[in-house]
Image (tube, rainbow, N blue to C red):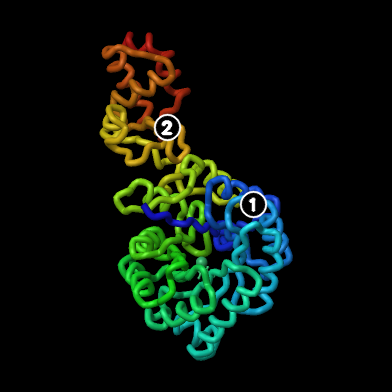
Amino acid sequence: MAKVHIFDTTLRDGEQVPGCKLNQNQKIKLARQLDRLGVDILEAGFPISSPGDFSSVQAIAETVKNSIVCGLSRAVKKDIEVAAEALKKAKRPRIHTGIGTSDNHIKYKFRTTPDVVLERVHECVSYAKTFVEDVEFYAEDAGRTSNEFLAKACQIAVNAGATVLNIPDTTGYCLPHEYGEKIAYLVANVTGLEHVHISTHCHNDLGLATANSIYGVINGAQQIECTINGIGERAGNTSLEECVMILHQHKELGFYTDIKTQLLLETSKMVSEEMGMVVQPNKAIVGTNAFAHSSGIHQDGVIKERSTYEIIDPAEVGVDKSSIVLTARSGRAALAFRLKEIGFDVTKLELDALYDRFLQLADVKKEIDTDDLHFLIESKEEIYAE
Ligand code: KIV
Ligand code: ZN
């Protein structure tokens, strides 16, 4: 089994969500939780971006005990100096530096030539190396960069001492097989990768961030950049919990992570609360409906044997147990199961009578809760008299 390193960027790329700014105390609280969760690398922020971010990165660097603490910079000397300063007290500091490599970035953002960009790759990585040993190079918009030019930029970064090559699909444009081929191309065409990791960094504009990251790993990447709940600008980043559980459930792929999966739900809730950003109910792994069953056929199956309709044991991701939600689509098995859960063991005859009344109520209510069940039980005599 090969280890996949989890690089969490909830506090940097994730925090770029409009209206979800965190204060320093909130960032420290989340950094501690991410460290507990077992992320290998924690991107704490973009120190040059504001005095507040500088100070948060500094505080996180002092606080975090296990994870590598990383700070972002552009391919600009001042950015790199400020990132190095903010990371000074980190046990294991990493500078993340780089530049856009796609035609679009070169032509419109930098208004320069490919050769100048390649020079800047060399300059930023070698300058960051004068401050820390661990330097990650990113090629922004790698997803829309030709594989040939990307390999050139990556080769220069490796020769300058980069320890990680980050291949962002910044605009979430790639299809899974294209992104996988890109990683495979780099593995085959960049030399000196023996001690260098390749990293995925996928955005979710087409809903493909998780699939692309997994294809990246299958094709040779050893690190995934992701955020809790998949938060991030626009449609967000790759979701940490999805990637971790895909690798965990599909052991035949041959990968593992060091994430303590039982802390996933707790961490998701904490991020959601601190950021004031609701998790969609049907979100894979951590959504409130991820382990809820409401149709009669599924409920009957799950009651008989959980794995009939669940591929993950809820306890593995920190969910107490799957839930049987009573609706007008529920059957007798689900009603009997829920009644038993709250302490009422009913006979078949009683159940038949209760079920009719249950359906009448369920047709006018979205969901039948515990209070409603007590009400049904209390009116049992009346029901039998009917
Ligand atoms: O999406 C992206 O390209 C990034 C880089 C700055 C790493 O977030
Ligand atoms: Zn990004």
Question: At 39% across and 14% down in the image, what residue appears?
Answer: 344
Observer-nearest of 36 and 53: 36
Question: At 33% across and 13% down in the image, what residue appears?
Answer: 346
Say left or right for 213 vs 231: left
Q: To which quarter of the image does residue 126 belong?
A: bottom right
Q: Position of residue 243 (x, y in %)?
A: 41, 53
Placement of the C terminus among the 4 image quadrants: top left
Which one is in front in this view, the residue at disc 2 or the one at disc 1?
Answer: 1
Q: Is residue 142 above or below residue 243?
A: below
Label 2: which secondary element: loop
Q: To which quarter of the image does residue 111 belong?
A: bottom right
Q: Tell me which amino acid carries mark 1.
A: Val
Q: Is residue 197 above or below residue 350?
A: below
Q: Are marks 2 and 1 in contact (CB under 8 Å)?
A: no
Q: Position of residue 374 (x, y in %)?
A: 45, 18
* Label 2 sits on residue: 321
Say left or right for 352 vs 261: left
Q: Is residue 163 above or below residue 368?
A: below
Observer-nearest of 382 and 290: 290
Question: At 67% across and 55% down in the image, what residue appears?
Answer: 60
Q: Whole-Å distance between the Cαs marked 2 and 1?
A: 32 Å
Q: Tell me which amino acid carries mark 2.
A: Lys
Question: At 34% across and 70% down in the image, what residue appears?
Answer: 184
The CB of the residue at mark 1 lies under 8 Å from ligand 1 = no
* Label 1 sits on residue: 64
Q: Position of residue 156 (x, y in %)?
A: 49, 81
Residue 170 seen in the figure: yes
Residue 207 seen in the figure: no
The CB of the residue at mark 2 lies under 8 Å from ligand 2 = no
First in sequence, mark 2 or 1: give its number. Answer: 1
Label 1: which secondary element: loop
Q: Position of residue 100 (x, y in %)?
A: 51, 78
